[in-house]
Image: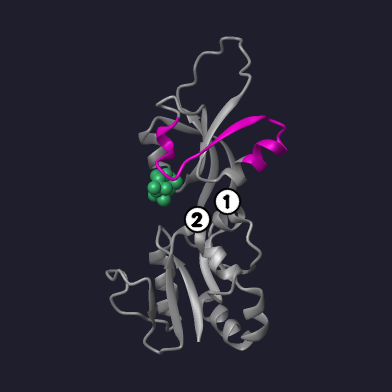
Amino acid sequence: MLTIALTKGRLLAGALARLAAAGIRVPGVEESRELAVRDLSGKHRLIFLKDMDCPTYVEYGVADVGICGKDVIGETGCDVLEPLDLGFGRCRMVVAGPAARARNSGEVPTSLRVATKYPRTALAHFEAGGIPVELIRLSGSVELAPGLGLSDLIVDLVETGRTLKANRLAVREVIAESTARCIVNRASYAVKNAAVRRFLDAVGSP
Ligand code: PRP
């Protein structure tokens, strides 16, 4: 049996559609509150996790494979194989700030505060640019932070851009593109190679 880690957020519908196309079906799963379910064949167990926890479950081998965003794999820094770009869930990791920039007063800010759910990604980005920042780690609704004076900038995901616009923010810089990826536990790839390969072939060709 293969255990498949899925995330409960924006990628869930796309991931379940790929699994269904690959013959891995769990009727009623989207309405259920059960967090671990078997598919109809009994050959797969699906577990439902918060985005950031998906690579952890795969790294530790609790799940053999997982479907999660490239952004999350980079942020967690987990040691997993990433053999397949599934192509859906396309979004961008960006630096954003107030759409109406304050007039340049001539003052150079001594420290820049950046609010984000992705501190590791944000820090790596600003460090690479040699820009010192104070990171403020948030769990969600990050787009509120600049308007309420908590931070100067945010680092966050943008898909349609509606949340930025509704909160009077604009993209300042694109850090990376992200899509849904299939990740695999290193030991599972060796020990359950035939089953993992069958799974990758099936979900990789929609
Ligand atoms: C994500 C992301 C942005 C929003 C972007 O948040 O962090 O807030 O979606 O989407 P858009 O560009 O299509 O508007 P999510 O919906 O996961 O909720 P959260 O704020 O609770 O993290």
What is the magenta range? 123-145
Q: Earlier in the sequence, mark 2 or mark 1?
A: 2
Q: Which mark is residue 177?
A: 1
At 59% across and 52% down in the image, what residue appears? 75
Is ligand 1 closer than 8 angstroms to the Cβ of mark 2?
A: no
Q: Is residue 28 left or right of residue 112?
A: left
At 35% across and 80% down in the image, what residue appears? 26
Q: Quadrant of residue 10?
A: bottom left
Task: Name above or below for residue 162 compared with residue 84.
Answer: above
Determine if residue 191 is in view: yes
Task: Name above or below for residue 185 compared with residue 135.
Answer: below
Q: Quadrant of residue 127?
A: top right
At 42% across and 44% down in the image, what residue appears? 140
Disc 2 residue type?
Answer: Arg
Q: Position of residue 115 (x, y in %)?
A: 51, 36
Number of labelled discs? 2
Task: Name above or below for residue 201 compared with residue 152.
Answer: below
Q: Position of residue 183 (x, y in %)?
A: 58, 69
Disc 1 residue type?
Answer: Glu
Q: Is residue 35 left or right of residue 193?
A: left
Q: Position of residue 78 (x, y in %)?
A: 63, 61
Determine if residue 160 is in view: no
Residue 134 shown in magenta: yes
Q: Are marks 2 and 1 in contact (CB under 8 Å)?
A: yes
At 31% across and 69% down in the image, what residue appears? 30
**Secondary structure beneath disc 1?**
strand
Residue furthest out toward the top = 105
> Which residue is denoted by mark 2 in the rendering?
90
